[in-house]
Amino acid sequence: MVRKKICLLGTSAVGKTSLVNRFVNNAFSEKYLTTVGVRISKKTIQIDSNRVEMLIWDLNGEDRFQKLSTSYLRGASGIFMVADGSRADTLESAKLIYRRVSGDVGKLAVCLLLNKADLQEDWEISDDDLANLKSEGWKIFLTSAKTGTGVEEAFETLASMLVPNE
Amino acid sequence: MNRIEPSELLLSQSVPASVLSSLDVAVLKHRGDMAFELVGETPEWLPRIWPAVKHTGRLYPAKDFLYLEHFIDDALEHWNHAESKWLSSGPWTEVDADGTDWVLEAVALTVNKTQLLLIKFPTTDHSTVRGLLQEGRNQGLEYSRLLKEVNKREVLLHCIVHDLSTPLASIKGSLTLLDEDNHVAPDGTELLQIGLNQVGKMQELIREILSTFARDVEPLLPHVVPASEAPSLLTCVSEVANVMKPVADIERVSMLVETDDVDSTETRVVADSPRLERVIFNLVENAIRHSPEQSEIRLKVEDRGGSVWTGIADQGPGVEADVMPRLFQKFGRGNQHSGKQGLGLYFCRITVEGWGGNIGYEPQKEGGSLFWFELPKPSVAMA
Ligand SMILES: Nc1nc2c(ncn2[C@@H]2O[C@H](COP(=O)(O)OP(=O)(O)OP(=O)(O)O)[C@@H](O)[C@H]2O)c(=O)[nH]1
Ligand SMILES: [Mg+2]
């Protein structure tokens, strides 16, 4: 079994904790409880012939109230940058945070999650924006912690980027 | 279990055991090699988040709390070098077997060469901060939700008001023509006047609504249809020209669509056709409104490779220089005029820009105005 540490980063209330709860406990809550410091969960999954124990570090959202301490990223192999697709400004924050931390921790496997995909009516990311992000090299998943859409796929893809291919 | 009594360790440093237990802190003594022992009473909450304390006296917090893995490295460093001050891990959230979140904090300190690790709830200071953070973030979310709602309503309101005012203008125009040209028998003129008065009142009302809600908020982006359903700009222009012909006739203005042999399938653009027609309609209506009698309005559609360009040229007086910079802003011509004009062009701009296009105005050399806009073709926009 291999152990891999992954981190979820992004500004507050984009759904980082909710994504982890969906993936680990298959649960969702509408109530918003902001995360203090770090919240760590574990889940073991099977990738081809490898069992991967994912140590999931859900970090506090970085916003004007609070900065993110990059020391939390020590030892991480992969990161999810998370944005809320119904608030386009959270995508800008995600990109900004990524630019800053990638300077500190170097190149890690990274996926971009555009969360709250169930909020069709309020969706603010156009197909053009998506195409642009892809051309900037982002690996993107549209996810919904509420309905579960894309969540497992995203975690499995990131995990498979961390274990050697056979 | 060789648990150390608090008296052994702490009373000697004149810290009464009661103080320790009232602080509700788990005190761990470092025995070396990352192994720890609990000192004194086990706080009642500790077994819930750390079941190992029920079974063993030798505890490995760095193994059991992933979060502390790195912190204990830092703590070792701290114990070896910094004698006096304490080191905090910062708060973290631990989830117990029931799924309940516990916010905790670890502190490393040295007391008389004894290396201690405390696990505790963050101080009240922290919970105040947490409460404020939650409050701030809730309000931030609420704010962006409200802002979005307000934007939606405002754009909706503008569109409704706009849709109301356009037919009203033609009703007024028609009634005025009837009045001026003595088409109506004398006993009908009174009714006609009532009609005109009511139209005037309604226009006043619309102006009032617009000035009340004239706030400077960014509108929502228009919606884009899939490439396969992209409307042809040429078809839309011809369509609008047809619909507007009677209005132009009333104003004694002629309208000419110049196509330069462009193919309607070559002029498909990123847009949705009802709104695209509304954009063209606004510009044509604007042109008619500013055209002198017996003049001509030319509508032109050009295939420009990656995009399609449309121009609407009139032979009116043109736009005054001081108005030009504000032409496409909301209420660009100022509130003292009918809000409608400014709003029409504003609507055109937000819509065209929302589709990734451009809109502009140029005075023509031979006099009159040229309003134009350019929209990307769907294949190019998707690339
Ligand atoms: N509709 C919808 N709501 C979601 C989704 N994911 C999260 N939410 C809601 O968004 C709010 C914030 O979710 P959290 O998971 O706490 O966000 P976070 O990114 O962990 O926030 P911080 O810990 O403050 O950084 C909560 O009210 C969730 O119920 C989703 O996919 N769809
Ligand atoms: Mg959270």
Image (cartoon, rainbow, N blue to C red):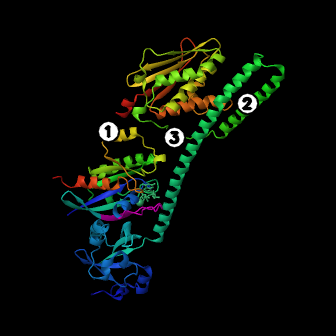
The magenta stretch is: A25-42
Q: Nearer the viewer, residue A137 or B116?
A: A137
Between marks 3 and 2 in the image, the one whose residue lies nearer the viewer = 2
**Residue B241, above or below B128:** above
Real-space CA distance between mark 2 and mark 1, rounded to the nearest whole angstrom: 54 Å
**Dominant secondary structure, magenta:** loop
Name the amino acid type tagged 2: Val
Q: Quadrant of ligand 2?
A: bottom left
Q: Which residue is mark 2?
A: B199
Is there a contact, CB below 8 Å, between mark 3 and mark 2?
no
In this image, B335 relative to A63: left or right?
right
Q: Which residue is mark 3?
A: B220
Q: Chain of mark 2?
A: B
Residue A119 at x, y percent in the picture: 46, 50
- In the rendered structure, find residue A135 and report the number of the disc placed on it: 1
Secondary structure under tag 3 reads loop
Q: Amino acid at mark 1?
A: Ser
- The residue shown at (29%, 73%) is B61
